[in-house]
Image (cartoon, helix red, strand yellow):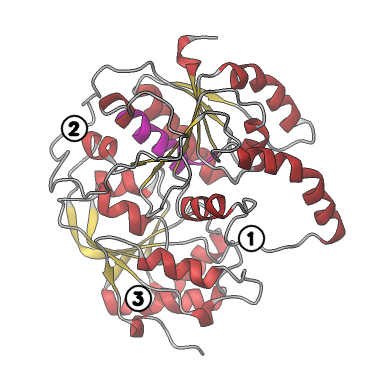
Amino acid sequence: MTPSARTLAFVESPVQLLNVLEWAHLDRTDPPPPGPLLDGVPRQRKRRSPPAGEGAGAGPAARAPAGPAPLRIVVLPPTDPMSRGQLRRMAGLARDEGHEVRWQEARGGRLTPLKALAALARDVRAAHRVVIGDPFSRYVQLLLTLVRAGELVVVDDGTATMEFAAQTARGERLVRWHRVGGGGLPGRIRELAYAPVSATARRRFTAAGAGGRRVEVFTSMPVTVHGGMSLRVNAFAWTRARFGPPRLTKGTDLVGTSLVETGVVDPARYLDAVCALTREHGVTRYFAHRRESPEKLRALSEATGLEIVRPDLPLELIARRGPIGRTIVSFPSTVVHTLPYALTGTGVTVAVCDVDPDWLTGSASARARSFLAGVTDTARDVHRLPAQAAPAAG
């Protein structure tokens, strides 16, 4: 095993890879103190806003100071082309930082997951520290059953980190907040067959099941760690050091969401909401989520006249590089927590529009309404749009 593989990271999305780079940057410049953390007294750093203008003026050529060995980052790509394209570009940035990147297909064919597991098993068992981007991923949970590392780090996979912290604190099984039961009898059989794997993975994050392992959560989200977990705040120091400050445009930009694609929000209500926000706030560009369908984006463009932008990198990097609007409007999502960090000191205002409960579909999970409200309520340094900005039911 090469020295770089002493720390092994698994990512499945561009945002996860970005946050691994943020974690590696902070670990080089501000590593955690040595010693076990799973002793019932978590080490939790104080949340703070970064100083205004911090990182401003630093160009892409800047480099982090020398520190621990680079990571080996294993990319487990999804099948959709947009995610794969963004992941390849993020992989290039990771290599520029000196990290080793391995592209490992784990989806697509019946035997592909098993082949990937066999290819990764040795490195997983030998790693001293394992970094993961999605504790809800079934494939990552399967890999966690092989982990012998003394340190386990969970980096942000967006707002899902909030649910991860809450569910592990309550001792619940890990289930995504928007997921609802389905699949009939075959689905229930699969759930029962997979339950032991999920339970083993969940125990990796608890003091009782970690066996003296250090467990750290690295996040921009407002979470409270429990047991012996430690917390380090992701203030997007790497992003601010590498890119920007951005040139600001006069218009307003709107950030799209995949709430329609996940079955949470009704498509017609979402279209109405985008139309209303465009009229009220002078929106000129719509930054599409990588999971938004071409058909939906075409309908939005025809109804609003907005320029549809499909970013080739996570929005935090796109916004930091610019040009970007002086106001960025978003529905409840990860960016209402991350963009204030990434754009601190730039003069950009981030505004959030609540999701009206009437917009939810009949198949939305019972947790969806309170979770989306919590995403908005806990956002820092954002402007709350008035309720009348949302369209009336019709």
User: Which residue is under mark 2?
Assistant: 59
The amino acid type, in three-letter code, at marker 3 is Leu
User: Which residue is under mark 1?
Assistant: 179
Nearer the observer: mark 3 or 1; the answer is: 1
Q: Quadrant of the N terminus?
A: top right
Residue at 75% x, 46% y is 195
Q: Is residue 371 above or below residue 288?
A: below
Please tell me in which quadrant of the rendered image residue 103 appears.
Answer: top right
Q: How far apart are labels 2 and 1 at the CA level?
A: 41 Å
Q: Is residue 75 magenta?
A: no
Classed neighbour count for the residue bearing mark 2: other residues with Cα under 10 Å, few (<14), some (14–19), many (≥20)? some
Q: Secondary structure at mark 3?
A: helix
Residue 366 as seen in the image, left or right of residue 215: right
Q: Position of residue 70 (x, y in %)?
A: 39, 19
Classed neighbour count for the residue bearing mark 3: other residues with Cα under 10 Å, few (<14), some (14–19), many (≥20)? many
User: Which residue is under mark 3?
Assistant: 277
Q: Secondary structure at mark 1?
A: loop
Residue 231 as seen in the image, left or right of residue 111: left
Residue 220 as seen in the image, left or right of residue 237: right
Magenta segment range? 12-25
